[in-house]
């Protein structure tokens, strides 16, 4: 026995991309069904952005206490109360989850708890989580937003105990004495910061020549310098060949013959799209290397079916999922929608120090054929950075006599500075135009101003 329903839009997966589409579509008057097999909010809310940033804030509090003497404050760090940290993290996640659930309900979206599979270009068959009969949910259009899961390394078996992924790392009930992190991207570097502050000995192994390898090389080098100072070890340009359990931990072999050992190994080499077992072949949705192929409006090869978020080959970030979800809803509502400019999207790694960027790196700008000018402003010259005790850079890449193409920053709180950089890049502003804007003193944002002043040929607190 199966029950049949009709909606304007049926969304499969209630993570950032799926729920954003559902909320916007409902706002635009559509009847929406939102199918989720786990929890509303998906990876970002339950296993990604939010819980990791809560742990990073605990790490920051630890560092503040440990470094209190530098600011003339006598405070002694005692220990990390992991149960307390988890309670705080779960409290943040729980509060946001309740808020989101209320919002979805208030927009009249029908939330369906179950695992869905496409059964035709306009229907999804749902196996309810609570058991019982399958349900066929039909819609004029379907949106696939099933997201991603941690990528595995062939031959390395994740057991969830000694060899773990970021999902497992969020629920550990002990602090490891030592950790090897495979992958020096955003997730790897964020966990390196967390565990280093919690007292573990951390070693990162990265296959590419630098940590945060997608960033401008100046940002990578600045982060590497700071990690070294903090005692976070890393090996770059190193391929892992094996990771095996030993009686008291894990042993990791590298291609060059080096062997490393630790209590725990975190596999953080990226995220794989969830595109298998959801009926794509049944309805003929085309994929490439597991990612769903879409056009500029996130429409798949089947005209009634759209896809957004981590399972399409765009940046795997929550705010990208939100933007793509909104784009689909507005496209379906018949609005004139501008395609997303993926180069204009801000990227932040919330390690200590933070790494934030928008637009082209110097290397990619040259590859795009630009004749470039660049300035790297050292935060050592910024009053607020000195007050906070942070170091880092603001690097601006501009086309010669033309607009700013990219801004790259490293330092405490630079994730909060990226919004100005994003306006500069997305508005095609020239350095001399930005240089006219007066920044409040003393703020970190002055460093953004100083870098543009220097590029405009009139540096204030830096040399030409
Ligand atoms: C550790 C970590 C830290 C991160 N930090 C950040 C950050 O700071 N900032 C940032 O922008 N991004 C961050 N991300 C990335 C961000 O979480 C993802 O880009 C975002 O969650 C992708 O959204 P999505 O909607 O594509 O997929 P997801 O959030 O993965 O949601 C997909 C949903 O679909 C459901 N689903 C899957 N298959 C089915 C099915 N067959 N039936 C029903 N439901 C199904 C899943 O249960 C899931 O809830 C982080 C990720 C991780 C892992």
Image (tube, grey):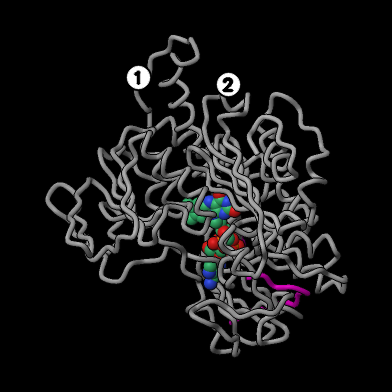
In the displayed structure, 117 sits above or below 172; it is below
In the displayed structure, 381 sits above or below 431; it is above
In the rendering, at what x and y percent does residue 124 appear? 62, 79
Q: Quadrant of ligand 1?
A: bottom right
Q: Does the magenta stretch include residue 287?
A: no
Q: For the residue labelled by badge 1, is the local secondary structure a helix, a strand or a loop?
A: loop
Name the image quarter holding the C terminus.
Answer: top right
Q: Mark 2 points at which residue?
A: 387
The magenta region covers: 1-14
In the rendering, at what x and y percent does residue 116 appear? 56, 74
Question: Of label 1 and label 2, which has the lower sequence position?
Answer: 1
Residue at the image point whose x is 51% and y is 59% from the top: 214
Q: Nearer the viewer, residue 28 or 423?
A: 423
Q: Which of 126 and 203 is in front in this view?
A: 203
In the rendering, at what x and y percent does residue 1 appear? 58, 82
Q: Quadrant of residue 205?
A: bottom left
Q: Quadrant of residue 436?
A: top right
Residue at the image point whose x is 64% and y is 74% from the top: 307
In the rendering, at what x and y percent does residue 324 appear? 70, 66
Q: For the residue labelled by badge 2, is the local secondary structure a helix, a strand or a loop?
A: helix
Identify the mark at residue 296; answer none if there is no mark: none
Left or right: 461 in relation to 55? right
Alpha-carbon span between mark 1 and mark 2: 25 Å
Residue at the image point whose x is 67% and y is 65% from the top: 370
Q: Nearer the viewer, residue 237 or 318?
A: 237
Q: Name the residue under label 1.
A: 78
**Label 2 environment density (alpha carbons within 10 Å; few <14, some 14–19, many ≥20):** few
Left or right: 183 in relation to 398? left
Residue at the image point whose x is 50% and y is 14% from the top: 71
**Label 1 environment density (alpha carbons within 10 Å; few <14, some 14–19, many ≥20):** few
């Amino acid at each position: 026995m199966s029950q049949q329903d009709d909606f304007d839009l049926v969304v499969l997966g209630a993570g950032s991309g799926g729920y954003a589409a559902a909320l916007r579509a409902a706002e635009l008057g559509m009847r929406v069904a939102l199918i989720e097999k786990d929890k509303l909010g998906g990876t970002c809310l339950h296993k990604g952005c939010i819980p990791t940033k809560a742990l990073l804030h605990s790490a920051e509090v630890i560092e503040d206490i440990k470094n209190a003497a530098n600011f003339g404050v006598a405070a002694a760090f005692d220990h990390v109360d992991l149960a307390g940290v988890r309670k705080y993290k779960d409290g943040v996640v729980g509060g946001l989850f309740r808020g989101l659930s209320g919002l979805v309900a208030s927009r009249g979206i029908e939330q369906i708890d179950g695992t869905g599979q496409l059964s035709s270009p306009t229907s999804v068959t749902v196996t309810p989580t609570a058991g019982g009969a399958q349900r066929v949910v039909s819609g004029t259009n379907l949106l696939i937003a099933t997201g991603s899961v941690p990528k595995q390394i062939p031959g390395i078996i994740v057991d969830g105990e000694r060899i773990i992924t970021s999902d497992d790392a969020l629920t550990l009930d002990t602090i490891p004495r030592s950790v090897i992190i495979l992958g020096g991207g955003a997730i790897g570097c964020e966990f390196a910061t967390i565990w280093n502050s919690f007292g573990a000995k951390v070693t990162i192994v990265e296959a590419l020549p630098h940590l945060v390898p997608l960033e401008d090389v100046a940002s990578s080098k600045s982060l590497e310098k700071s990690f070294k100072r903090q005692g976070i070890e890393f090996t770059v340009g190193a391929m892992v060949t094996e990771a095996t359990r030993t009686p008291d931990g894990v042993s990791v072999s590298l291609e060059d013959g080096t062997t490393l050992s630790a209590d725990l190994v975190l596999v953080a080499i990226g995220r794989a799209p969830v595109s298998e077992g959801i009926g794509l072949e049944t309805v003929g949705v085309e994929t490439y290397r597991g990612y769903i192929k879409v056009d500029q409006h996130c429409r798949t090869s089947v005209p009634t079916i759209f896809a957004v978020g981590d399972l399409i080959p765009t940046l795997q970030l929550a705010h990208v999922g939100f933007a793509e979800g909104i784009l689909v809803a507005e496209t379906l509502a018949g609005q004139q929608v501008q395609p997303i400019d993926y180069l204009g999207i801000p990227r932040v790694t919330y390690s200590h120090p933070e790494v934030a960027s928008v637009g082209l790196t110097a290397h990619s700008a040259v590859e795009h054929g630009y004749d470039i000018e660049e300035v790297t402003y050292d935060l050592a010259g910024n009053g607020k950075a000195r007050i906070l005790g942070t170091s880092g850079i603001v690097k601006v890449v501009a086309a010669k006599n033309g607009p700013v193409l990219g801004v790259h920053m490293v330092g405490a709180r630079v994730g909060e500075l990226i919004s100005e950089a994003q306006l500069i890049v997305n508005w095609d502003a020239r350095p001399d135009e930005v240089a006219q804007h007066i920044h409040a003193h003393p703020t970190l944002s002055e460093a953004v101003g100083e870098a543009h002043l220097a590029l405009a040929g009139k540096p204030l607190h830096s040399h030409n």
